[in-house]
Amino acid sequence: MAGFTLSALAGRLREAGFRTENFEYSSLELGPDSAAVRLRERMCGYAGEVVHLLGHSLGGLVALHAVDTDEALPDGRIVCIGSPLIGSAAARGLDGHAGLHWMLGRSRDILRSGFDEWTRPREVGVIAGTKAVGLGGLFNSLPSPHDGTVSVVETQLPGIADHCSLPVTHSGMVFSSDVAAQSVAFLRDGHFSASDQPS
């Protein structure tokens, strides 16, 4: 995804005292494997420092894929925002449309299936949205509550450190001050400030 999509969220993180870098990848042309390799290389450039990752939607899956390895990587936490960590019903529905399945690009498999559980020591926090405005329901039935694209249940990966739900849409998450505040809380403390409640 284009890095500018997270610029508002990055600005709020900087205001909270974090140094931020946007990480761009092509979900259509290169896919999550290539992105994960590049992300690990970027992280290794900060050896000896704490490197947190924050990803929206597919970006959260890419972040987990990148650190799901035995490679020595800098310590840090991960926040996944609206990420279908156990697989996306919308993606599976889209994949069933002969004229539209190309939109999943090389991320088809990870979007369809996600992960079974999280067993790595790196702490992962997940923020889900519950404001059901979006196009995901056009491609498949989404269990409620959902953010218009990803259902809350699709974000609940066994083994994560914490989870919270906020009344935001899938695309609106990257502009939400509540999402930013909860992200900051998890990156600092390893838990959200008040699970399932706006800050």
Image (spheres, rainbow, N blue to C red):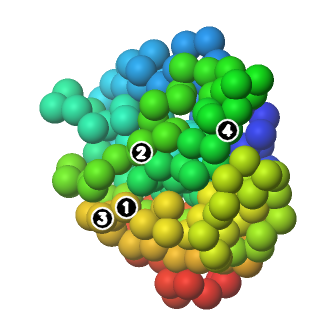
Q: Mark 2 vs mark 1: which is more N-terminal?
A: 2
Q: What's the distance in space between the residues labelled 1 and 3, CA to CA?
A: 4 Å
Q: Which residue is mark 1?
A: 157
Dot 2 amino acid type: Gly
Q: Give the structural element (helix, strand or loop) at label 1.
A: loop
Q: Nearer the viewer, residue 22 or 163?
A: 163
The N terminus sits in image quarter: top right
Inspect the image, locate mark 3, and give the three-letter code of the amino acid beneath it.
Pro
Badge 4 amino acid: Leu
Task: Please say if 165 is above or below 78.
Answer: below
Q: Are marks 1 and 3 in contact (CB under 8 Å)?
A: yes
Local crowd size for mark 4, using a 10 Å CA cut-off: few (<14), some (14–19), many (≥20): many
Q: Position of residue 141 (x, y in %)?
A: 66, 61
Q: To which residue does mark 3 refer?
A: 158
Residue topped by disc 4: 94
Q: Residue shown at 67%/53% (left/top)?
A: 140
Report the residue at 57% width, 52% height from top: 89
Callout 2 secondary element: loop
* Residue position for label 2: 114
User: Could you give the CA–CA distance between mark 2 and mark 1, rounded to whole angstroms?
Assistant: 9 Å
